[in-house]
Image: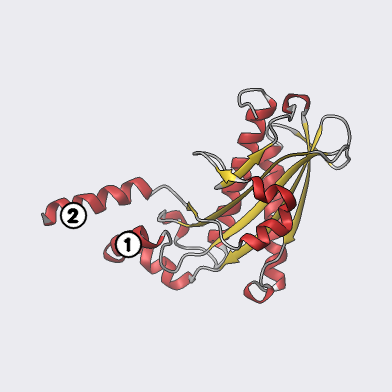
Amino acid sequence: MQVRVAMAILLLLVAAGCATTTQAPVGDQAAVCAFLGDSCQMLKPGQEGEAAERWVNPNAQFTQYNKVMLNVVGFFGADASKVPPKDQQTLTDFFQKSLSEEIGKKFSVVEQAGPGVLKVQVAILDAEAATPGMRSISMAVPQLRMLTTATSLGTEKFPFAGGAEAAAKITDSVSGQLLAAGVDRRMGASSMRAAAQWEWGDAENAIKAWAELMATNLYAYTSGVKKP
């Protein structure tokens, strides 16, 4: 029996070993709705490879778009005392840079509205700091790493891990027509790459994941691979 338990935990470690973040339930719904407006009421659970909750306009003609205008508004509705102003700016700038890099691989990133331009607005709704020293120890020491993984199964959060929540809305840059909206929350996972990092490292890893997610899904819709 003990061998079976040990093997089960080992398999969990291997399965989660390469993940720097894990999707978590969305938090403060009031902040989500304050940023997304009426579309908040239309959000539905996303599928694998999508935001935790999302909505896509069934009448959107995504294939007409080949350019993207980005606007990361920064922290929205978050408790400012949780994140020092300097770190808020650092995470906001990192979000803008990450989105520009990932979306820039598939689209022309522009600064002016116009025909064929999608406007993407993103807000950070919340961020949680990791506990750097304990985070590193819990991931590096085999016994603690195993305990950390087992503990997270019941809480959907690894001990000492940080994370973040963000929302996005996509509109036609000229008409303002809402084309899509979504919200996602991610927490630090069990990857060794997430161990030795600064306190906002898990939040940065969540931002990287969102940038890749946004670029992949936008391209899938505008190329016609995915339908609204």
**Residue in the image at 47% along x and 58% along y:** 194
Q: Residue 199: image x %, image y %?
A: 54, 68
Quarter of the picture containing the N terminus is bottom left
**Residue in the image at 85% along x and 43% along y:** 111
- Disc 2: which residue: 5
* Badge 1 vs badge 2, beta-carbon distance below 8 Å: no
Q: Is residue 29 left or right of residue 202?
A: right
Mark 2 Cα-neighbour bin, 10 Å: few <14, some 14–19, many ≥20: few
Query: Which mark is first along the chain, 2 or 1?
Result: 2
Q: Quadrant of residue 100?
A: top right
Disc 1 from disc 2: Cα separation: 15 Å
Q: How many marks?
A: 2
103 or 183, nearer to the observer: 183
Q: Amino acid at mark 1?
A: Arg
42 or 68, nearer to the observer: 42
- Disc 1: which residue: 145
Q: Residue 150: image x %, image y %?
A: 30, 60
